[in-house]
Image: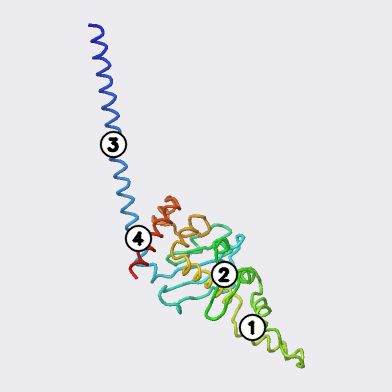
């Protein structure tokens, strides 16, 4: 009788505990499902917002090295290369000052999105050269010019544009070099072109995975960090690589 009572007692206790565990699991699953549903809604809404505004709204692209803003450009329309404007020196200095304070809101100003690329995003790349039309440039030379206060002079010396025939006066030589420098525009525009070459080359070589992969490595800062980018930040990089490899394979098969 006692044994039977003990068995009944433990059976009831086990039933009550099991019922509470099952109830807790159900509640946790329900809560998790609701959370996933809400997150999915925000991510979907954010994707739609990016799709609608990313091409047409102004975006700012900046290059940073050792906490210093080296160059930058603003795109009004991603489908129109002529809508790109390089940032002048004064704007770069102001942006650099705000960057040191982590004041990203003032840096964004009225732009839709801001991308700040670290130089490491390009230094870690497998490619060592950049081809533009009929010209080939070593990446190390481009990095050197981007870090220099006088990138045009480095370019002139590298390309041999300072090799002027003998027999002319120093004044004539200086005038020829000055005209060649003038043809290349300002140093800020020149650096902006170099930056654009780097981004364009990586996007052609690696596709969108370049942005997401370097973002995961903290080599690209995106502001504001919307739901999509926060979600990507949580996803393992290996999974992102697999997804993009799959997409690239499907796209290649359809072509």
* Mark 1 element type: helix
| Residue occupying the far top of the picture | 1
Tell me the crowding category of disc 2: few under 14, some 14 to 19, or many 20 or more residues within 10 angstroms, Cα based.
Answer: many
Dot placed on the residue nearer the N-terminal end, 1 or 3: 3
Dot placed on the residue nearer the N-terminal end, 1 or 2: 2
Please tell me the numbered disc located at residue 181: 1
Dot placed on the residue nearer the N-terminal end, 4 or 3: 3
Q: From mark 1 to mark 4, how far is it between C-alphas? A: 44 Å
Left or right relative to 53: residue 125:
right
Tell me the crowding category of disc 4: few under 14, some 14 to 19, or many 20 or more residues within 10 angstroms, Cα based.
Answer: some
- Residue linked to disc 4: 47
* Mark 4 element type: helix
- Residue linked to disc 2: 71
Q: From mark 3 to mark 2, how far is it between C-alphas? A: 52 Å
Tell me the crowding category of disc 3: few under 14, some 14 to 19, or many 20 or more residues within 10 angstroms, Cα based.
Answer: few
Q: From mark 1 to mark 2, how far is it between C-alphas? A: 19 Å
Quadrant where the image shows the N terminus: top left
Please tell me the numbered disc located at residue 27: 3
Q: Considering depth in this image, is 165 or 73 the residue closer to the camera? A: 165
Dot placed on the residue nearer the N-terminal end, 1 or 4: 4
């Amino acid at each position: 009788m006692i044994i039977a009572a003990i068995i009944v007692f433990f059976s009831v206790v086990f039933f009550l505990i099991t019922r509470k565990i099952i109830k807790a699991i159900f509640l946790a699953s329900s809560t998790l499902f609701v959370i996933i549903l809400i997150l999915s809604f925000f991510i979907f809404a954010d994707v739609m917002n990016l799709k609608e505004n990313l091409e047409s709204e102004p975006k700012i692209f900046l290059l940073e090295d050792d906490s210093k803003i080296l160059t930058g450009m603003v795109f009004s329309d991603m489908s129109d290369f002529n809508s790109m404007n390089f940032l002048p020196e004064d704007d770069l200095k102001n942006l650099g000052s705000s960057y040191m304070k982590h004041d990203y809101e003032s840096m964004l100003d009225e732009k839709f999105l801001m991308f700040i690329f670290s130089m490491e995003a390009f230094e870690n790349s497998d490619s060592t050269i950049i081809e533009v039309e009929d010209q080939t440039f070593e990446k190390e030379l481009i990095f050197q010019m981007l870090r220099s206060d006088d990138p045009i002079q480095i370019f002139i010396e590298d390309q041999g544009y300072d090799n002027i025939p003998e027999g002319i006066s120093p004044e004539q030589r200086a005038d020829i070099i000055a005209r060649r420098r003038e043809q290349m525009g300002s140093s800020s525009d020149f650096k902006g072109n170099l930056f654009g070459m780097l981004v364009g080359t990586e996007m052609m070589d690696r596709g969108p995975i370049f942005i997401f992969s370097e973002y995961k490595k903290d080599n690209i800062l995106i502001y504001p960090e919307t739901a999509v980018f926060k979600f990507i930040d949580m996803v393992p990089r290996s999974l992102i690589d697999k997804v993009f490899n799959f997409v690239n394979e499907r796209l290649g098969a359809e072509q």
